[in-house]
Image (tube, rainbow, N blue to C red):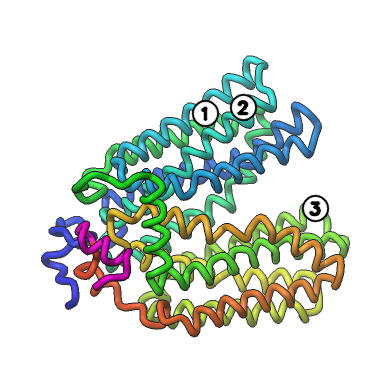
Amino acid sequence: MGMSTEAVGSAGTPATAEQLVPLHRNRDFRRLWVGQAFSDLGTTASALAYPLLVLALTGSPVQAGLVGSANLATQTIFGLPAGALVDRWNRRRVMIACESVRALTAGTLVVAILTGWASLPVIVVLGVVGSAAGVFFGPAQSAALRHIVPTTQLPLASARNEARSYAAELAGPPLGGALFALARFAPFMADAISYLISLVAVASIRRPLQDERRGKPEGLARSIMMGLRFVVKEPFLRAVLGVAPIVNASFIGLIFVLVVVLRERGVPVAGIGGVQSAILAGGLVGALVAPWLQRRLRTPVLIIAALWLMVLLVGAAAVAPGTYTVAALLAIAILPSPTINAGLFGYQIAITPDAMQGRVDGAISLFATSLGPFAPLLAGVLVELWGGQWAFAAFATFLAVAAVIASVSRGIRTMRPLDRDADQAVDSPGQLRSAIDGKS
């Protein structure tokens, strides 16, 4: 049965007039989007400033790298518990608390820099606390989106969020570098302000951000296992576990290979930075084009076609002559990525029970990024052993594996139109337990 736009909203609840208007007129979505635009920009700006600060204080690249490694480790350790806890806590309060903590840690670092007691331990601790808050904010925001945006608009909302992320990745590092050159504390001050803006935006959202919770929550370990079992048993989510880690790691490796190849061919550092910016710009263009594609092609067709297009473009980069020709092919290859992400993420939210949103988001996010840390190392080994062209060919092969998984996956090939899923969401405790246990 299709969803009646006169009776059903984003989570199977009565729709308000605002839920039925175009997405750009949805006030709560605008508030969340604008708040996160500032937050993302501040985060990407300070991400560059952290190692610059440690280098300025210690002169040690190893210690500068320690900050980034500690933050990544925090995201890995807290990923699954954060999703489970978010599912039992009030999402609005979680998001406000997380932005408060992140604003406080950034502000504390500003004070530490100005008073002269900033040191490596202080920077690492503040970075870890801020990263932990970000880990909790992520699944809370993703789960809340289902209550802000009608189900049929989830892919479009995801595409808008993809555009926001690519824009922040494009503008954040130059902004962080410029602010750091102005004053060491400046990027962290901007980061603190960005979190306060996000906090106000979240607090101003009017509608409830979750369904009413009934019954006593399970223990934390059991709750995490329930989430993992749900992901593994759901064919679509199982397919995402196969596709997302390979695609994410492949692009991380490809960027690393490109940097090494450009450097070996004598391209100056400024030129390499320009090439990376062009590739990110390709992702931004892809995010802006995604809604147009979503209106014209079925989501499974779009995802599978986009993956095979990536394979062809990266394969062409392996044999293409000329340095900048290769860079241009990679910039075009990243164009379909936001479309894939928007389709997968929007459908993930739509088919996941409200009480399970945090755990599913935490599990998918953790596994999607699980291969990323190994990608630069693998890329370096491939370049050293076989050279840049064969390294590009190897990553084209990895992308082909992801494309094959998507092409043969029943979970992706049988994706239903989202307007049918709003009425089929599994939200009662009995239905939820049956879905997890594989019972009818």
Magenta residue check for 100? no
Sequence-first tag of 2 and 3: 2
Q: Are marks 2 and 3 in contact (CB under 8 Å)?
A: no
Dot 1 crowding, Cα within 10 Å, few <14, some 14–19, many 20+: many
Residue occupied by mark 2: 185
Question: Does residue 207 appear in the picture of this structure?
Answer: no
Residue occupied by mark 1: 105
Q: Which residues are magenta?
A: 427-440
- What x and y, as percent, mark residue 20? 20, 62
Dot 2 crowding, Cα within 10 Å, few <14, some 14–19, many 20+: many
* Kind of residue at badge 3: Val
Dot 3 crowding, Cα within 10 Å, few <14, some 14–19, many 20+: few
Disc assigned to residue 269: 3
Which of pointers 2 and 1 indicates the residue nearer the eye? Answer: 1
Q: Are marks 2 and 1 in contact (CB under 8 Å)?
A: no
Question: Does residue 375 appear in the picture of this structure?
Answer: yes
Which of pointers 3 and 1 indicates the residue nearer the eye? Answer: 1
Quadrant of image for the C terminus: bottom left
SS for dot 2: loop
SS for dot 1: helix
Sequence-first tag of 3 and 1: 1
* Kind of residue at badge 1: Thr
What is the CA distance from the residue labelled 3 to the residue labelled 1? Answer: 33 Å
- What x and y, as percent, mark residue 214? 19, 48
- For residue 274, what is the image quadrant? bottom right
- Establish if 296 lies above or below 418: below
Residue at image point 45% right, 36% down:
195
What is the CA distance from the residue labelled 2 to the residue labelled 1? Answer: 13 Å
* Kind of residue at badge 2: Phe
- What x and y, as percent, mark residue 347? 36, 68
Residue at image point 61% right, 72% down:
332
